[in-house]
Image (spheres, grey):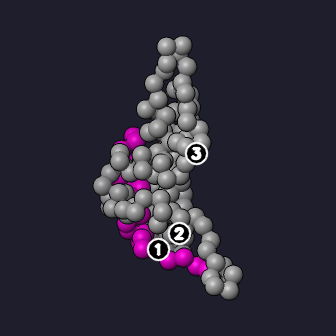
Amino acid sequence: MNQTQKKIRDNILSMLDFLDRCVGQPDKPNQEMSEIHLNEMYSIFANAIEEYGKLVYMKSIIQDSDNNYEINYRHKFRDHTTKYHLALTELPKSIGDVFEDGFTKMPMNILNVDLDDKGDPKWIEFDIDIDTLRKCVFDFRNQLV
């Protein structure tokens, strides 16, 4: 269990470290990062949040009397909505504000393609700017380190 939690935490930190190098920090922004890469940065950030929810879930599991762990694989470990909810209850307020609707709005908008009435793929808008993302990455990273 400890190895699994460490691997998840290391993956989250790896994503956040990459984002930190890309977007910079609130007091030292990366001026070379253009708005055009915001979608890619945001999708990595959304994945880090989901993985954090998985980590929160894994930390909540208690060994039984036989020293085994029972993992609800389908409805907790793999469920996106559950993991976002768990993550947002423990992450800084700046992140909760961006994800006020949980998994259903922002991550779904950026991580998925939608279709218009004619069946053609359409661009999905979302309302986060690079300064907000930079602040969220900074706050999230500081909570983990």
Residue at the extreme right = 119
Q: Amino acid at mark 3?
A: Arg
Mark 2 or mark 1: name the one nearer the start of the chain: 2
Distance Cα–Cα, label 2 vs label 3: 19 Å
Mark 1 or mark 3: name the one nearer the start of the chain: 3
* 29 to the left or right of 4: left
Residue 30 position within the rendered picture, expressed as x and y whole percent measured from the top left: 44, 65
Task: Determine whether label 2 and label 1 are within 8 Å by CB.
Answer: yes
Q: Amino acid at mark 2?
A: Asn
Mark 2 or mark 3: name the one nearer the start of the chain: 3
Q: Can you tell which mark lies on residue 142?
A: none
User: How many C-alpha atoms fall within 10 Å of the one at disc 2: few (<14), some, or many (≥20)?
Assistant: some
Residue 96, compared with residue 125, is above or below; it is: above
Q: Amino acid at mark 1?
A: Phe
Q: Secondary structure at mark 3?
A: loop
Residue 19 position within the rendered picture, expressed as x and y whole percent measured from the top left: 49, 57
Distance Cα–Cα, label 2 vs label 1: 7 Å
Q: Which residue is mark 3?
A: 78
Residue at the extreme top = 66
Residue 22, compared with residue 87, is above or below; it is: below
User: How many C-alpha atoms fall within 10 Å of the one at disc 1: few (<14), some, or many (≥20)?
Assistant: few
Q: Nearer the viewer, mark 1 or mark 3?
A: 3
Residue 94 position within the rendered picture, expressed as x and y whole percent measured from the top left: 32, 58
Prevailing secondary structure class for the magenta stretch in the rendered image: helix
Query: Is residue 128 shown in magenta?
Result: yes
Q: Can you tell which mark lies on residue 126?
A: 1
Magenta region: 122-145
Whether residue 36 can be seen here = yes
